[in-house]
Amino acid sequence: MTTRLNYFATSPKAMDILLNQENYLDEAFKGRKLLLELVKIRVSQINQCALCIDMHSKDALKLGESFHRIYGLNAWRDMTCYSEKEQCSLQWAELIISDKPATDSDYQLAVQVLGEQTLVDLTLAINAINSWNRIAKAFKPAVGSYDAN
């Protein structure tokens, strides 16, 4: 893949918007970073964003996530290794980026399992990674060189 342009250098103020959002999410998910990384990986898989799959898989591994749970994300519904909160978060993520509306029952389940604050923060995180995926797919940065250290 050929890189089209360096979007950070071309429009740093625009990228600061997303970076500030990431700073908020890092704080909001303190102590639950693996959950956030699993959601980022799953949304990136759906969006077929190689850069973000690579980056967030490496970040998850650095945080102690197993290869098994990372590559299992494509079939998370059929695997028993994800907690109820993780399953609910992954389901919400898939729903939010789909063309289907969130039903009242979808919402009630998510609030019951995750709580209102986490649901708002999770929805922001889903939208954030969706934005990063779209930017990466548009401008095609080099994939594979990300170092999680």
Image: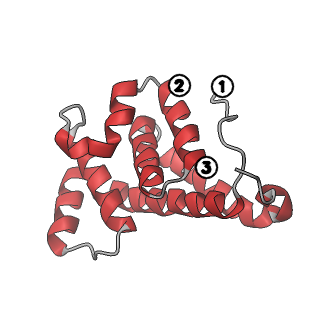
Closer to the N terminus: mark 3 or mark 2?
3
Q: Are marks 2 and 1 in contact (CB under 8 Å)?
A: yes
Judged from the image, the secondary structure of the residue bearing numbered disc 2 is helix
Residue 142 visible, this orientation: yes
Look at mark 1 in the image and give the residue it sits on.
149
Circle number at residue 62: 2
Residue at 72%, 45% (x, y): give it.
142
Judged from the image, the secondary structure of the residue bearing numbered disc 3 is helix
Residue 66 visible, this orientation: no
Please tell me whether mark 1 or mark 3 is closer to you in this view: 1
Is 103 rendered above or below residue 94?
below
Judged from the image, the secondary structure of the residue bearing numbered disc 1 is loop
Closer to the N terminus: mark 1 or mark 3?
3
Look at mark 3 in the image and give the residue it sits on.
23
The residue most toward the left is: 105
Closer to the N terminus: mark 2 or mark 1?
2
The residue most toward the right is: 9
Q: Are marks 1 and 3 in contact (CB under 8 Å)?
A: no
Kind of residue at disc 1: Asn
Relative to residue 100, is residue 84 drawn left or right? left
Kind of residue at disc 2: Lys
Q: Residue 1, image x and y in percent? A: 70, 50
Question: What quarter of the picture does the C terminus occupy?
Answer: top right
Q: Residue 133, image x and y in percent? A: 56, 58
Q: CA distance from mark 3 to mark 2?
A: 19 Å
Task: For label 2, count other residues whose C-alpha is less than 10 Å away and answer few (under 14), some (14-19) or many (20+).
Answer: few
Circle number at residue 21: none
